[in-house]
Image (cartoon, rainbow, N blue to C red):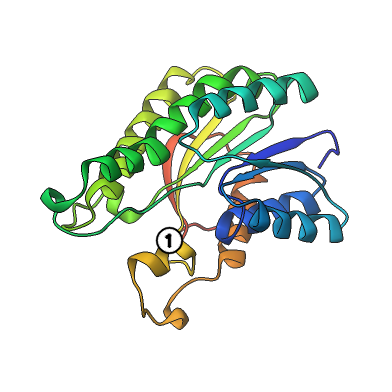
Amino acid sequence: MNKNKNALITGAGSGIGAEIAIILAKHNFHTIITGKSISRLEKTEKKIIDNGGSCTVVELNMNNFVGIDKLGLEIFKRWKKLDILISNAAILGTLGPIHHQNNDEFIEVLNVNLVSNHRLIRALEPLLKNSAQPKAYFMSCTVANKTKPFWGAYSVSKASLQHMVKIWSMENKNNNLSISIINPGKTNTKLRKQAMPGENNNNLQNPKDVAEKIKDIIFSNKIYKGEVIDLLRFKTD
């Protein structure tokens, strides 16, 4: 991979996002990592630097829509393009009967998991189209496609995200912008622990292993147009 390639990874302070950033940096991508916690981002940055990679740290809450717009502008100023977008940041919200969910929390979950991705698309599509091989990936989950009680705003946000991404991909069907949705499956992450406290970690995937599978997708030559990729069933060519 070329050293002048760059990648933006949101939610890169831990879990899958951090591991993808570390892997891409090892493959000579300059990584732009975002997250709410600067201390967690610095841990990811240290691993990237220790492995000889390069990194730009951006403390950013995904409900800061003006911040997302400014990030797009800064990427344009520094690099003029973006080769890879990996939208990984998400929040769970409270699980329970939907009529019990606090309205402010419901809106916050939709803002972080859905609306922020619209802002990313608005800010970054021109930059992606300046890349020779642009790729955009959006992390989703099983409850986006399978209706389950008590998953409330999280399930709604992920289902809506998938629909929006599919619309965007159809609008780009005649170019080489690869757009896909990735369902990692059950993985040992902070969000998973919040959703399923006390779950046996031995039954879960390791974020590093999930990131390796995503790397195989990124480095393939296939151009996706809105497909949902189930990592538990994904096989390299």
Q: Residue at x 51, y 17 (%)?
A: 174
Q: Secondary structure at mark 1?
A: helix
- The image position of residue 18, as x and y in percent, is 64, 56
Which quarter of the figure has residue 221? top right
Mark 1 packing: few (<14 Cα in 10 Å), some, or many (20+)? Answer: some
Picture quarter with the N terminus: top right
Kind of residue at badge 1: Leu
Which quarter of the figure has residue 223? top right
Foreground pick, 217 / 43 = 43
Foreground pick, 153 / 128 = 153
Q: Residue at x 45, y 32 (%)?
A: 116
Compared with 104, 203 (above or below) is below
Q: Residue at x 32, y 55 (%)?
A: 142
Relative horizontal placement of residue 18, taking residue 26 as reference (left or right): left
- The image position of residue 14, as x and y in percent, is 59, 59
Compared with 116, 202 (above or below) is below
Compared with 95, 169 (above or below) is above
Residue at the disc numbered 1:
191
Q: Residue furthest left?
A: 99
Relative horizontal placement of residue 131, taking residue 69 as reference (left or right): right
Relative horizontal placement of residue 224, taking residue 18 as reference (left or right): left
Q: Residue at x 41, y 48 (%)?
A: 140
